[in-house]
Image (spheres, rainbow, N blue to C red):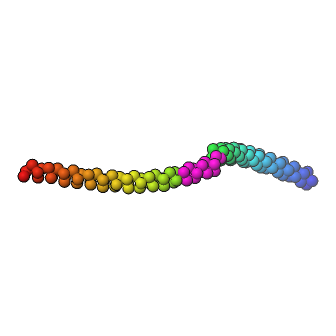
Amino acid sequence: LGLALKEMHDLAHEKLHGAVGAHAEEVAGKLSELQDKHAELLEAHSAKHDALHQRIDDFAHLPQTVAELREDLGKVATLSDALEARMEELGLASKEMHDLAHEKLHGAVGAHAEEVAGKLS
């Protein structure tokens, strides 16, 4: 009976060792897969991180550029106002020239009409 118990114990011990070994192999395989997946994710994260920093570097000059654009827009607005004022001045000058030309034309037409009327009579 003692030998039978020892054999059963040894057999159970052997089966337990086999089961533990198989489980250990399964866990090791899953751990290896997880480590591989972790490495892939880390690499992808690192690439995204580097790309983000590159974009930040690419646009690092923007605040300066925006300030320069605002300054340029201010200059354009000033020039636009000056141009509008000048166009108004030219418009007034153009109206004056038109009125003067109209006056001279009326004078010339009147003089010509008098000349023609003189020749007719």
Residue at image position (54%, 51%) is 75
Given the current orientation, which residue lies at the most extreme left position? 121
Is residue 106 shown left or right of residue 19?
A: left
Residue at image position (21%, 50%) is 108
From which residue to which does the magenta span run? 60-75
Q: Is residue 68 magenta?
A: yes
Task: Give the image location of residue 36, x and y in percent.
Answer: 71, 44
Image mark count: 0
Residue at image position (71%, 44%) is 39
Task: Give the image location of residue 10, x and y in percent.
Answer: 87, 49
Is residue 21 shown left or right of residue 52?
A: right
Is residue 42 shown left or right of residue 14?
A: left
Residue at image position (44%, 52%) is 86
Is residue 89 shown left or right of residue 44?
A: left
Which quadrant does the N terminus fall into?
bottom right
Residue 40 at least partly seen: no
Residue 107 at least partly seen: yes
Magenta span: predominant SS is helix
Compared with 50, 8 (above or below) is below
Q: Viewer-proximal residue, 118 or 46?
A: 118
Q: Is residue 87 magenta?
A: no
Q: Viewer-proximal residue, 39 or 77?
A: 77
Given the current orientation, which residue lies at the most extreme right position? 2
Q: Viewer-proximal residue, 66 or 13?
A: 66
Q: Viewer-proximal residue, 32 or 113?
A: 113
Task: Give the image location of residue 58, x and y in percent.
Answer: 63, 44
Task: Give the image location of residue 16, x and y in percent.
Answer: 82, 51
